[in-house]
Amino acid sequence: MATELKMPQMGYDMEEGTVVRWLKEEGSTVGRNEPVAEIETDKAVVEFESEAEGVLLRIVASEGSIVPVGETIALVGLEGEEADNVPSAGSTESTDSDTAIREELTSESERHEVQEPIRNTTQESSESTPTTRILATPVARRIADELGIDLKQVAGSGPGGRITKKDVETFDPASSTSTKETNFEMSSSETPEQSPEEIPETVSETTDPSVNSMPGEKEPLSRMRQQIARVTVKSKTEKPHFYVSAEIDMTKAMVLRKQVNDQLSDDGVRITVNDLIVKACIESLKKYPKFNAYFQDDGIQFNNTINIAVAIAGEEGLIVPAILDCGSKTLRELSQMVKDLANRSASGTLNNQEYTGGTFAISNLGMFDVTGFLAIIHPPQSAVLAVGTVAEKPVVRDGELAVANIMNATISADHRIVDGVEGAEFIVEVKRLLENPMGLIV
């Protein structure tokens, strides 16, 4: 019997997704967990993997189709098996609002990754030439459209040649080249003394009056901004947040980090402060597993694995993908996993589980010289650690004035699951581990 591949739920409140591109044709052999299509959510374009192996018998949802979560988009089964009992996705009559939304979401300027142009395959002539796939962020596409720039002439500086906002803004039509400067990276905390190559990756989005909304104008909400609005309002409405803060002396951690990086420099490994924080949180979650759980009406559900979600800033908003099953990983392995996560977030090649599987989150604004802040819990998680910059401050040690590297950290937690005392115990454990960092590498 054929297996129905259904539109997955790739976000906390995702209700529908758009089929951007099929990676397999009807009649092609498909392996289990092999990518067969690209699906656009509110936040990114994600590769959709087949849950069965066999032959792609029928594509139910054509490219550009907006399909509700849980609806069949394709059938996989044995070669020659009948596959005519499922209606085409989106074949029901649409309302005017549905049509307007579909037109907006399938427009080129809002697309993360598309074929240019998208055509109805039933109307495309056999003489049509192959289309070229252009990788570009939604902001880049919108700005290019406003300025009349052909994206085919713009050189992308992002991972995989992806065109970023900065690429479009710095594009020179006369030379058909653009300044190649990565505009999407991950934030972390570092000290001012470090050289530029040691500074962690972060996002930098400039404000240019020529390509931004002017005073008095109303800027339409992007799909990502709408999704962020829904999730944060739902989180603050349903989850009774409470906050516990602590100052953490990072002096020893910074010294250890430099020693580790000097030792591993020949291997191309560079440990960041954020990697140390991730490791400290993992060990703390093992000791206080309630922070790795989520609330249900009939009880507290503990997760089987530790999946640390890391807040990453993109050009249109925040995403919180996770490094999966990282409870037993070494500091070196965690560092490589976090960097890989950031790179694939930029290129839009994360899988569904990485987008939705986080069990605890870390939000780090240290690179922006922020001393401290309160983060909103990302549902269905129950806690998030917010950390600021590592800065030199005067401290008193044994009655003597000294200078130390201090970092502020705040845990936001769901009061339905944990209480204030437990929040204090958790952040004090994170503090203990970071102030005595040898335990993080042995």
Image: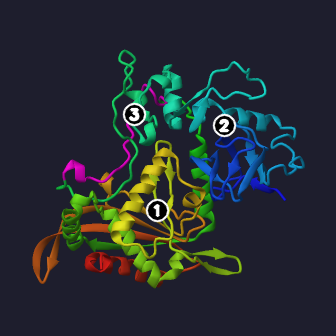
Mark 2 residue element: helix
Say if the magenta span includes residue 203. yes
The total of numbered circles placed on residues is 3
Image depth: mark 1 or mark 3 in front: 3
Q: Does 248 sit above or below residue 14?
A: below
Amino acid type of the residue tagged 2 in the rendering: Leu
* Label annotation for residue 105: 2
Image depth: mark 1 or mark 2 in front: 2
User: From this viewpoint, which residue is outermost toward the top?
Assistant: 174
Of labels 1 and 3, earlier in sequence is 3
User: From this viewpoint, which residue is outermost toward the right?
Assistant: 85
Which residue is nearer to you in this view: 407 or 127?
127
In this orientation, does residue 414 appear? yes
Q: Give the residues drawn in magenta, as a range.
A: 195-214
Q: Residues within 10 Å of mark 2 (few under 14, many from 20)?
A: many
The spot of residue 203 in percent (x, y) is 38, 46
Q: Does 196 sit above or below residue 248?
A: above
Instruction: Look at the image and tell me in which quarter the C terminus lies.
Output: bottom left
From mark 2 to mark 3, how far is it between C-alphas?
Answer: 23 Å
Say if the magenta span includes residue 186. no
Give the image's coloring scheme: rainbow
Name the residue carrying label 3: 166
Mark 3 residue element: helix
Amino acid type of the residue tagged 3 in the rendering: Lys
The spot of residue 165 in percent (x, y) is 44, 34
Amino acid type of the residue tagged 1 in the rendering: Ala
Residue at the spot 45% in from the left edge and 28% down from the top edge = 211
Mark 1 residue element: loop
From mark 1 to mark 3, how far is it between C-alphas?
Answer: 28 Å
Name the residue carrying label 1: 375
